[in-house]
Image (cartoon, rainbow, N blue to C red):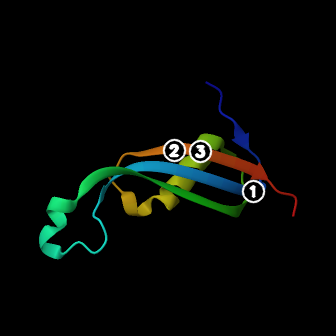
Amino acid sequence: MTTQIIEPGRYDYDITVRFQSTYIPEHTPPAFRNAAAYPTTRTRSVSGQFDLTEAIGRQVLRDVLVRRVCDDLMGQDVQVVRFDLDRTTA
């Protein structure tokens, strides 16, 4: 397995992750929330731009960005569905 190194510069990124969740339909009265809840899979997509000042491995960079996107999902199993990274010139 080869490690791709990302060189310093400005980058655009798009990340899509998938994780297990529990869905409770809107307007469910509090007394019925547990009975109405059911497991589901949710998807979260985030895009942005950043400046990289030091060379870093692509996998390490991906993991750092995923942790930022999923900081509220600590302890859950998160699957990365998409990770796009493009160098920008501006």
Q: Is residue 22 visible?
A: yes
Please name the amino acid that badge 2 sits on. Val
Q: In the picture, which quadrant includes the N terminus?
A: top right
**Residue 35 sits in quarter:** bottom left
Q: Earlier in the sequence, mark 1 or mark 2?
A: 1
Q: In the picture, which quadrant includes the C terminus?
A: bottom right
Residue indicated by mark 1: 11
From the viewer's perspective, tell me whether residue 84 is left or right of residue 78.
Answer: right
- For mark 1, give the secondary structure: strand
From the viewer's perspective, tell me whether residue 37 is left or right of residue 65.
Answer: left
Residue indicated by mark 3: 82
* Vertical position of residue 78 compared to residue 70: above or below: above
Residue indicated by mark 2: 80
Which mark is drawn over residue 86? none
Number of residue marks: 3
Q: Residue at x 58, y 48 (%)?
A: 62
The Cα atoms of the two marked residues, 3 and 2, are separated by: 6 Å
Viewer-proximal residue, 59 or 37? 37
Question: Residue 80 at x, y = what percent?
Answer: 51, 44
Q: Residue at x 45, y 48 (%)?
A: 18
Viewer-proximal residue, 7 or 85? 85
Q: Residue at x 51, y 60 (%)?
A: 69
Please name the amino acid that badge 1 sits on. Tyr
Question: Residue 86 at x, y = what percent?
Answer: 76, 50
Q: Are marks 3 and 2 in contact (CB under 8 Å)?
A: yes
Please name the amino acid that badge 3 sits on. Arg
Q: Residues within 10 Å of mark 1 (few under 14, many from 20)?
A: some
Q: Is residue 64 visible?
A: no
